[in-house]
Amino acid sequence: MDKLPKALDELVEAFCLLPGVGSRTAERYANYLLKRDPKIAQNLSDSLNNLHSKISFCKKTFAIISSDQEYSDLYLDPKRDKTIIAVVSEPFDIYAIEKTNQFKGTYHVLGGLISPLDNISSDQLHIKELIKRVDEDNVKEVIFALNASVEGETTAIYLNQLLKDKNILLSRLAQGLPTGIDIEYADIITLTKALEGRYLVK
């Protein structure tokens, strides 16, 4: 069998870089784009080109924002309670929690979880900024809204040690979140129950 044309082969290899996409799936994606209207591929290309140039991160919460903003709309919203912070691992966790319409505080994105196996230490996360926010915003409660995993547990324990001497409530999401599930993929009912049943950790 002849080799794929270079342009198609490079596209397949590019798709293979995505998590969970193997060579067969990558080939299907490439074949789909090849057979469809070229405008679909062009739109995809334009979106990818804009990904880094038109997206930035909030200076306070590290949530995803447009590049022409400095702070997220959620943080600037006067109806949100800045004295309550839900600490999440990744920006997309915010959108998952927001779908429940149960949380009226603000967020803080760590940018990952402590994971020695992946060479991710606390210094690589937005933890110092969180400590600073606790003081600047007169925070009353910090909710550890982290994944129910070994890494999530490790990170929560570390944060608890750093914050336990502050005069604030420290809570975690209730066990409505099954072990091993990522916040981003949890369903609305599960997240709602987890928020409602959060518990103190000190």
Image (cartoon, rainbow, N blue to C red):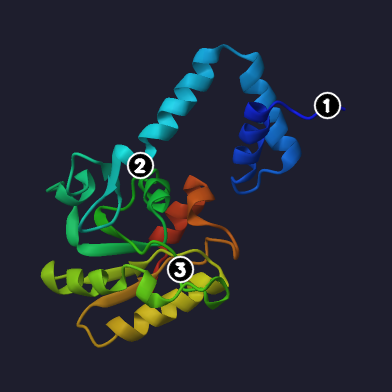
Residue extending farthest to the right is 1
Q: Position of residue 49 (x, y in %)?
A: 40, 33
Say few, some or many: other residues with alpha carbon within 10 Å of mark 3 (under 14 / 14 to 19 / 20 or more).
many
Q: Give the alpha-carbon distance from disc 3 to disc 1, as whole Å.
A: 45 Å
Q: Amino acid at mark 2?
A: His
- Is mark 1 in CB contact (under 8 Å) with mark 2? no
Circle 3 residue? 113
Q: Give the alpha-carbon distance from disc 3 to disc 2, as whole Å.
A: 22 Å
Q: Residue at x 68, y 32 (%)?
A: 9
- Is mark 3 in CB contact (under 8 Å) with mark 2? no
Q: Position of residue 53 (x, y in %)?
A: 31, 39
The quadrant in which the C terminus is found is bottom left
Task: Please name whichever residue, 150 or 174, is drawn nearer the observer in this view of the structure.
Answer: 150
**First reached walking from the N terminus: tag 1 or tag 2:** 1
**Position above or below: 163 against 33:** below
Say which of marks 1 and 2 sits in front: 1
Q: Position of residue 31 (x, y in %)?
A: 69, 23
Q: Quadrant of residue 8?
A: top right
Q: Give the alpha-carbon distance from disc 1 to disc 2, as whole Å.
A: 36 Å
Q: Amino acid at mark 3?
A: Leu
Q: Residue at x 46, y 53 (%)?
A: 191
**First reached walking from the N terminus: tag 3 or tag 2:** 2
Q: Is residue 132 left or right of residue 36?
A: left
Q: Residue at x 62, y 27 (%)?
A: 7
Label at residue 2: 1
Q: Amino acid at mark 1?
A: Asp
Circle 2 residue? 52
